[in-house]
Image (tube, helix red, strand yellow):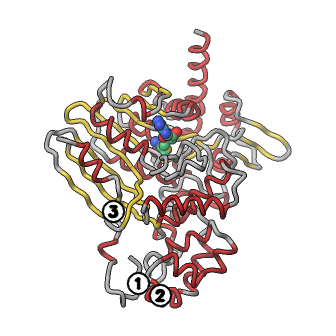
Amino acid sequence: MTERHDQNTTSAHWARLGQVMRDLDWALRTESYRHAAGAPHQPWLPAEAADDPLYHLLHLGESQAAPPPELAAALAELGLYGASERGHRTAGHYFTAFRGLVTVADHHGRPARSGVYLGEDGLAFTDRLLSAHAHGTALDIGSGSGLTTSALAARGLHTTALDISADCVAATAATAALNGLAQRVETAQADATKTLGGGERYDFIASNPPGVVVPETLDYGPGGNGGPDGLAVVRAVTGGAPRMLRDGGTLLMRFESPGDARGPRILEEIFEQAGGSSVFVTVQSRLPMRTRSGLTALRAAAHNPELSPAELLRRLDAHTDALGAESFYTSFMLLRRDGRARREVHDLTGRRRTAGPVSARPEPPNGDVSQLPPGVTGLDWQPHLRLVRERWDDAAAAARRQGALDAVVAEVFGDAVERDPVHSRSLHALLSGLPGIA
Ligand SMILES: C[S@@+](CC[C@H](N)C(=O)[O-])C[C@H]1O[C@@H](n2cnc3c(N)ncnc32)[C@H](O)[C@@H]1O
């Protein structure tokens, strides 16, 4: 009884904070700064993105200027407000907002407080959730910060959210309360690889499962860990979730999969498991596995402090080479339990459009963030983009001779790789449009 009372009180405090944020139009401000930065799905912007003390306090966790008293009071009720001569703080809690929905999560650029991940993938997926035809009841598998759960609830769906992490379950409940949606959201801590398949039926199931390829010899946070082939949780969702749909119900999943020039490896399994349901897949992006491993090494560093960056990369490369994974794909799938068994795959990666004769002469990538390969923006790509532009003709000549990205990078950019083995993995993605590279 006491615990229930405490939960209700906490939920009421989050709801009050959410009301204060709405009164201050905080979500709208965040969206304006994000669009001005040209990064429509980037949840965490740098300090320079806005000269707004409110934004600095809530988004970056600190501000020199005192917040409005009602915001300080609402944060203080949750034990999140600290003020000293060094400034004003939110006790390691960071807030961002998307399409009018506020969410609490860890900030990429700050030391993680808990392991509540929110990335560009989450915002892109939320966009899809807000576009899909949906009604009735929903299940969100791997709810994370709870932005996706709140998006479903905001559309009027009574939503159950599950996550393996207790911190994520708490963040999902807090986010629902922040958005004034607590009445429509239930949360549960559960492992999708053990619990999906039976029980309750839903009209709509959403999932953005972790899909990073992580060899057993490395530790990694659960937010992204997809196991040794990256597909452990994706398989749990594609195997179990369709059986939890009511007739006519929909499963919308964003998923990652290693693959090769033919496409994402998991597609065949998805089609086999879908049986009589219709499946519509869009393959959104393709990243060289070497670049993905650079990102993975960057994020694995904190979990494996005894290993050098070069050793992390060595293990990841050996592992992904053994898997035969040259590329890392991101896709969206819509599965409808309609008894029609239709199959559609749309490859939007541009492979077909740009695949031309070896003599084709594409330009080096420009610096427009929205035009860069996804995943590169997690790495320090700017110095490497400068190098690519300076040495583009040499790289093109090397590509014609060598035909393999690893060889081109080693021949033309060996100095950059030596200086910074992890961030120089952005080179593979920046060079992937070279003539002659598959
Ligand atoms: C990529 S995040 C997605 C979070 C959120 N839905 C979004 O789109 O921003 C994946 C989430 O799945 C959770 N997760 C990982 N393995 C899981 C498992 N076996 N069962 C349930 N949740 C899992 C993680 O804790 C993480 O919150």
What's the residue type where badge 1 is placed? Pro
Residue closest to the far right = 85
36 over 146 or under it: above or below: below
Tag 2's secondary structure? Answer: helix
Tag 3's secondary structure? Answer: strand
Sequence-wise first label, 1 or 3:
3
Residue closest to the far front = 322
Callout 1: few (<14), some (14-19), or many (20+) C-alpha neighbours within 10 Å? many
Q: Is residue 422 left or right of residue 154?
A: right
317 over 100 or under it: above or below: below
Q: Is residue 209 left or right of residue 378?
A: left
Callout 2: few (<14), some (14-19), or many (20+) C-alpha neighbours within 10 Å? many
For the residues bearing labels 2 and 1, Cβ distance under 8 angstroms: yes
Question: How far separated are the C-alphas under marks 2 and 1?
Answer: 6 Å
Pointer 3 residue: 263
Q: Residue at 16% of width from left, 45% of height from top?
A: 341
Callout 3: few (<14), some (14-19), or many (20+) C-alpha neighbours within 10 Å? some
Question: How far separated are the C-alphas under marks 1 and 3?
Answer: 20 Å
* Near-viewer residue (203 or 431): 431
* Near-viewer residue (14 or 361): 361
Residue closest to the far left = 340
Tag 1's secondary structure? Answer: loop
207 over 283 or under it: above or below: above
Q: Is mark 2 within 8 Å of ligand 1?
A: no
Pointer 2 residue: 396
Pointer 1 residue: 435
Q: Is mark 3 within 8 Å of ligand 1?
A: no
Assign the C terminus to one quadrant of the image: bottom left
Q: Residue at 48% of width from left, 58% of height from top?
A: 40
Residue 71, position in %: x, y? 66, 36
